[in-house]
Image (cartoon, rainbow, N blue to C red):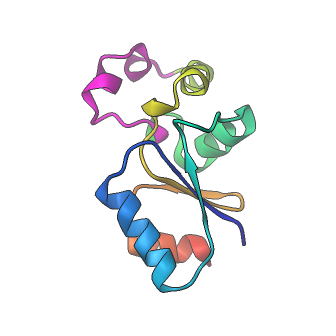
Amino acid sequence: MNIQIYWHKRNFDTQKAERYLKERRIPYQLVDLSKHRLGKREVELFVRGLSARGMLDLTDTKVKSHPVAYTDSTQNIIDYVLDNPRLLRSPIIRCDNKVMAGFDEAELRELLG
């Protein structure tokens, strides 16, 4: 099992996810999006797991003012996210080929199988 937590801002959901995994001694890898460039396959995996608009942080005012908030084109959203990963919700938790955004204990338990 390969677990990665993609994040770009320290928030309560990121901290909760880390705490949940640490308490259960489940190994994970933190991926800081300000230092790590996302690949196209990673973003496409996020789209399959969350939907194109579902992976965007539409509550953030910077994202709301960006053109990505007003497009429904999956390819345009992928292109915008590849150029600017700060548009993504934080954290995005990936376990092999399954993905979730934010922190929900029941959903994370299901993701981990």
Q: Is residue 37 magenta?
A: no
Which residue is depicted at the point 54% across and 20% down?
80
* 20, 75: nearer the viewer: 20
Is 30 above or below relative to 67? below
Which residue is depicted at the point 48% across and 22% down?
72
Residue 81 rendering spot, x and y as whole percentages: 55, 27
The outermost residue toward the top is 67
Q: Is residue 17 left or right of residue 93?
A: left
Is 20 above or below relative to 93? below
Quadrant into which the N terminus falls: bottom right
Residue 75 rendering spot, x and y as whole percentages: 63, 22
Residue 69 rendering spot, x and y as whole percentages: 38, 22
Quadrant into which the C terminus falls: bottom right
* 18, 41: nearer the viewer: 18
* 13, 100: nearer the viewer: 13
Which residue is depicted at the point 63% across and 74% down?
27
The outermost residue toward the bottom is 24
Which residue is depicted at the point 64% across and 37% down?
43
Magenta segment: 55-72
Residue 90 rendering spot, x and y as whole percentages: 42, 47
Total residue callouts: 0
Is 61 above or below relative to 25? above
- State the image quarter where residue 29 is shown: bottom right
The outermost residue toward the front is 35
Q: Is residue 17 left or right of residue 31?
A: left
- State the image quarter where residue 42 is shown: top right
Is 77 above or below relative to 5? above
Q: Is residue 108 left or right of residue 75?
A: left
